[in-house]
Amino acid sequence: MNITFRGGVHPDDCKEYSRDAALTVYEPSGDLVFPVSQHIGKPAKILVKKGDPVLVGQKIADNDGYISADIHSSVSGKVKAIERRRTVAGSMVDCIVVENDGLYNTVEGFGEDTDYTVLDRKQILFRIREAGIVGMGGAGFPTPVKLEPKNPDAINYVIVNGAECEPYITCDDQLMRTHAAEIVTGLKIILKLFDNAEGVILIEDNKPEAIEAMKSVVGSQRRIRVQVAPKKYPQGGERAIMKVVTGLDTKLAVLPADYGCIINNVGTVYAIYEAICKNIPLIRRAVTVTGPGINNPSNLIARLGTSCRELIEAAGGFKEGEEIKKILSGGPMMGIAMSSIDVPLQKGNNAITVLTEDPVEIAEEMQTACIRCGRCNRACPVGLIPQEMQIAAEKKDYDRYENKLYGLECIQCGSCTYVCPAKRPLMVLFKHAKTEILAIKRAEQAKAAAEKALADKQEKESLMELFRKFREEEEKAARKATENETRVQAIIASGKEEK
């Protein structure tokens, strides 16, 4: 009997648009734009300046701390500008703009074969960090940090997330069909870091070709197996994956490593293979361009920094005669609406979905007050109470939202919004609440830091004042001692003269 996670929903997967579109390499024609913040953590530090020549695979921005990631150029050419540009999320970010010369000249050693079996743990982690690899399922968490848990010997499972449960998206499906051997090798590389772990490749049952491809490569290999899970959203969430693979119910605010699990997206594992075995840093990724508004839905291998407009054109462009209502980065459940398509492809962007109907617009027309049916509570895969979270978020009762209802544990999967008969914009409310709570926390931290800095300054000034007074008293005492000594010497001298 298959174990499944609590809650969840069954939206139409809409994968028929691009399911059988083979992965195709797309080479960009325009400038490439590289945001220095394509990951969770501190932005990377820019290493180049305007006018500098760059090569494919050259590091152009260096990680700025433990939770950060390197950025590499995906083309050769010249740095055209360093300026703030808009990204997929709509924010303005410092970017490195590279004029593509179309030659694709590479750095020395790029693409050279390496035998991963001769590398030790330290060398593997170093190469993964130097390659700038982050979670490619969308989160963007630096992969080397995830691969360095406190106790590696306590890791029992290394899980490759091939669920790809988000509607419309099929690039991971195609990646598993066509690069199964490389993905298995990537998994073997990770298993070298965890001696007690079993490798599990988790795939939903709506991807029979990918399942067959992975099983044929895995065969009877020791420590690795393919596990098929029933199609259910959000199967790709970490807690859902751990429940299905281990059977464990996980507590809130606990990391997968605390339950003996390391989970990486299939694209991340493939990137690890390229970094370790081919000496290729993270400069490209698989991306789906799909939806009812696209002429030829496609799965592309595209270079990071490529304009999303170019990717849409590579998929045949927008359908004529269709009104494009919304363009999403990602899919309809967790994706974000794009305000512009003149933005670059980043490490965590797995899809561009073009819709001819806006489900949010339709829902807004049908929206009513909450009818307290409890469907959102039953659908939540984390076990939260969206019904109560909604009330707290609307009232901005963030203390209750965070500390009583555990609202920050929301994974923003959209299951609650999907099942709500009143069409309440639950996930939007929860995103805003989280944003505001984190902003408040940052402001409080900044205030505390400023107050501490002021207190430290005042303490330093107070100590300096005490030191100054001490020196003054010391100098005064020294002068008095000198004067006394002078008088004594004068008295002695006058006594000698009288004799």
Image (cartoon, rainbow, N blue to C red):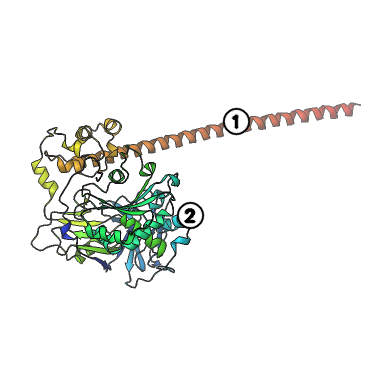
Say which element carries label 1. helix
CB under 8 Å between callouts 1 and 2? no
Residue that extends furthest to the bottom in the rendered view of this protein:
103
- Picture coordinates of residue 95 (x, y %)? 33, 57
Crowd band around label 2 with a 10 angstrom C-alpha radius: few (<14), some (14–19), many (20+): few
How far separated are the C-alphas under marks 1 and 2? Answer: 55 Å
Q: Nearer the viewer, mark 1 or mark 2?
A: 2
In depth, the one of 138 and 36 nearer the eye is: 138
Crowd band around label 1 with a 10 angstrom C-alpha radius: few (<14), some (14–19), many (20+): few
- Picture coordinates of residue 64 (x, y %)? 42, 52
Residue under circle 2?
A: 122
Could you tell me which quadrant the N terminus lies in? top left
Residue 171 visible to an observer of this rendering: no
In depth, the one of 377 and 25 nearer the eye is: 377
Question: Closer to the N terminus: mark 1 or mark 2?
Answer: 2
- Picture coordinates of residue 359 (x, y %)? 13, 48
Specify whether 468 is left or right of 412. right
Q: Amino acid at mark 2?
A: Lys
Q: Which residue is rendered at x = 60% and y = 30% of the image?
A: 469
| Numbered-mark total | 2
Q: Amino acid at mark 1?
A: Lys
In depth, the one of 371 and 120 nearer the eye is: 120
Residue 276 visible to an observer of this rendering: yes
Specify whether 292 is left or right of 277. left
In depth, the one of 49 and 299 nearer the eye is: 299
Say which element carries label 2. helix
Q: Quadrant of residue 305?
A: bottom left
Specify whether 65 is left or right of 417. right
Q: Which residue is rendered at x = 47% and y = 54% of the image?
A: 121
- Picture coordinates of residue 38 (x, y %)? 33, 54
Q: Quadrant of residue 371?
A: top left
Residue under circle 1?
A: 469
